[in-house]
Amino acid sequence: MFQSKKGQHHTILTCYDDRIDAIVDEEVRRIRQQGGEINAKDIIRPPGGVHLFTGRSDCRQAFYALLSSCADIVKSSVVHFWPHTNCQHCGRYHPEKIGTNAHSDLRYHLRSAEKVLAGAIAHFSSTPEQMPALDVRVILTIDQRIVTIDEAHALLPHVPEHGHHGTPCLGHGHAHPSEHRSGVHSPMA
């Protein structure tokens, strides 16, 4: 689970999709309980979330401008990027990337999370802004769980390969999502 420090200012970028409201609300509560600062305006939820800014090469400049603004203007000390599986935006605008089953859907969002993390690190390495801590996780929409990049890699072999888009990632025989702890992939924290 991501551990916030007292006084850290947080910004979240995730999707508009109301199916992930409970997870986002829970994470915001956790940040506040740990002494982190986050306001309604710090939670950015356009349709497509991370994918709106990174799904196509011509959109990435907006993503990097957003990163710089979060660091320079907002003074965010932690930026959270949470793409989510079974994303309606991706289903409409990137169907060639998400595939037709749950296995490829999780694989796509995992690759996206890894690219977002690498892109953010590369961006801050080439700018004068102080790099905030980066919390990049994947929300499993149907399972109602948020997982780290490492946890998502561990799930891939267990995700039904021939399930339809939107099949739960946690199949029969796996622990209930509430029995798993959320974590952070934050090499720069």
Image (spheres, grey):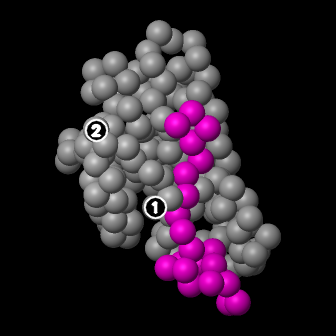
- Residue 151 at what x, y percent from top left? 66, 62
Q: Nearer the viewer, residue 15 or 151?
A: 151
**What's the distance in space between the residues labelled 2 and 1, CA to CA?**
35 Å
* Residue located 59% across and 27% down the image: 121
- Is there any visible trace of residue 13 in the rendered image? no
**Residue 24, above or below 51:** below
Q: Is disc 1 placed on a helix, strand or loop?
A: helix
- Residue 89 at what x, y percent from top left? 46, 55
Q: Residue furthest front?
A: 6
- Residue 163 at what x, y percent from top left? 68, 79
* Residue 178 drawn in magenta: yes
* Residue 88: image tag: 1
- Residue 33 at what x, y percent from top left? 28, 57
The amino acid pointed to by label 1 is Gln
Q: Nearer the viewer, residue 1 or 83?
A: 1
* Residue 134: image tag: none
**Residue 6, above or below 71:** below
Residue holding disc 2: 7
Q: Nearer the viewer, mark 2 or mark 1?
A: 2
Q: Left of 1 or right of it: where is 65?
A: left
Please report the bounds of the magenta region as a residue range: 167-189
Q: Nearer the viewer, residue 141 or 11?
A: 11
* Residue located 34% across and 59% down the image: 30
Q: Left of 15 or right of it: where is 92?
A: right
Q: Tell how many labels.
A: 2
* Residue located 55% across and 21% down the image: 123
Q: Left of 105 or right of it: where is 153?
A: right
Prevailing secondary structure class for the magenta stretch in the rendered image = loop
